[in-house]
Amino acid sequence: FCQAQQTSYSFDFTKEKEVRSGISVDVPDGNYKVTIRIGSKKKAGMTTIYGESGRLFIENLPTKKGEIVERTFTVNKRNTKISDKESVKIKPREKTKKNWDDQLSLEFSGDAPQIAGLSIEKVEDAITVFLCGNSTVVDQDNEPWASWGQMIPRFFNEKVAIANYAESGESANTFIGAGRLKKALSQMKSGDYIFIEFGHNDQKQKGPGKGAYYSYMTSLKTFIDEALEKGAQPVLVTPTQRRRFDEQGKIVDTHADYPEAMKWLAAKENLPLIDLHSMTRTLFEALGVENSKKALVHYPANTYPGQTKALEDNTHFNPYGAYQIAKCVIEGIKTNKLPLAEYIVADYQGYNPAQPDDLESFHWVPRSFIEIEKPDGN
């Protein structure tokens, strides 16, 4: 990455002799509009652009030799500081994540990335969508892990910034306890959104006061009340299914009564609900017992460097699977008739989880960051 600390955030790469893999700029917390010129006078290109810890913004954009096109998107940047006396209690694994540092980072990837120049400008009027959840939502830094939270920026124009606060292994109450909600609230304004997806890890908590209609419900209510106090719109999102099939090829529900508890709360509070629990059941069953593995982290040994054992994870998605789930969330936004739907990108063509994208036509260039250890949570 090129490190840039100057106060002028405009960069011209056309005279550089080497292709830059990315750039990082020291900036305060906030939303930043990135206007980027993609292409080259000398070469054809195929460019993909990520921001921060792997949020997808530009996907496989082709340019002809001599062609330079301009694209704009908005990136949310934050650090751990809540106030002069308080900071988010991040996990050791997060200390190297670009999501929590003092810089706004962009990564240039794809089959043949071509970047001619860019400018970065702080904006105050973008709608911020705060994502709160676990490893199925978090910005996964390393291949082959991925989540819907890092894919969904690709489907919004520059009027929307996705602020992904999710973290692997979190439940609703531990998310609050670590100060993640408090940090989000410190950045939240009227007209923003907060999407809340928990359940995978909450259901493992045992003891007095624990359970779907006890501690889980209490924590969800805290998210809702605090966001409404800020003038933001809470959206409840039921947890994604685990890949577990019965003998008839149907998905077995593994989340006990947590999805139903969330649905009950959404109805009681008159809040929009995106039912990923149902949509991912449809998706997995449409793919089938074997092909559904291709949406999750299932890879034979030696697929990746240092991977001596097969990866067989039935909870966490790979890029293809995460991309499908992100489209499910977009459909949920449309179904709920949220005003946010106005800012979905023009090239989005709709999605039906019963008819998932063709596996063979999904083109993904793996990023250079590889991790064979499973994320926290299951």
Image (cartoon, rainbow, N blue to C red):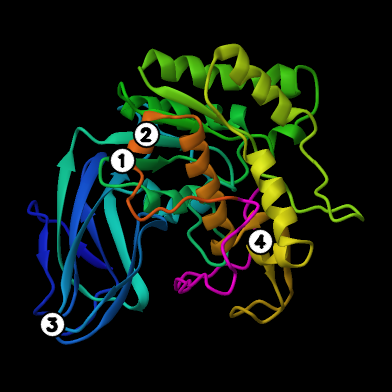
Identify the residue at horizontal 36%, vertical 17% (top origin).
Answer: 230
Residue nearest the observer in this picture, 139 or 60: 60
The residues tagged by marks 3 and 2 sit, at their Cα atoms, a distance apart of: 37 Å
The residues tagged by marks 2 and 4 sit, at their Cα atoms, a distance apart of: 28 Å
| Residue 163 at x, y percent in the picture | 38, 40
SS assignment at label 4: strand
SS assignment at label 1: strand
Q: Which residue corresponds to mark 4? A: 296
Is-magenta flag for residue 357?
Answer: yes
The residues tagged by marks 1 and 2 sit, at their Cα atoms, a distance apart of: 8 Å
SS assignment at label 2: helix
Q: Amino acid at mark 1?
A: Val
Q: Can residue 78 be spotted in the picture?
A: no
Which numbered disc covers residue 160?
1
Marks 2 and 4, the one that precedes in the sequence: 4
| Residue 304 at x, y percent in the picture | 60, 78
Q: Which residue corresponds to mark 2? A: 340
Task: Indicate the quadrant where residue 128 lies.
Answer: top left
- Label 2 environment density (alpha carbons within 10 Å; few <14, some 14–19, many ≥20): some
Would residue 270 be found to the left or right of residue 303 on screen? left
Identify the residue at horizontal 66%, vertical 76% (top origin).
Answer: 307
Nearest to viewer (mark 3 / mark 4): 3
Identify the residue at horizontal 52%, vertical 53% (top origin).
Answer: 93
Q: Is residue 344 above or below residue 116?
A: above
Task: Indicate the quadrant where residue 170 lies.
Answer: top right
Q: Is residue 186 above or below residue 198?
A: above
Marks 3 and 4, the one that precedes in the sequence: 3
Q: Which residue corresponds to mark 3? A: 41
Marks 1 and 3, the one that precedes in the sequence: 3
Chain part drawn in magenta: 353-378
Task: Indicate the quadrant where residue 10 lies.
Answer: bottom left
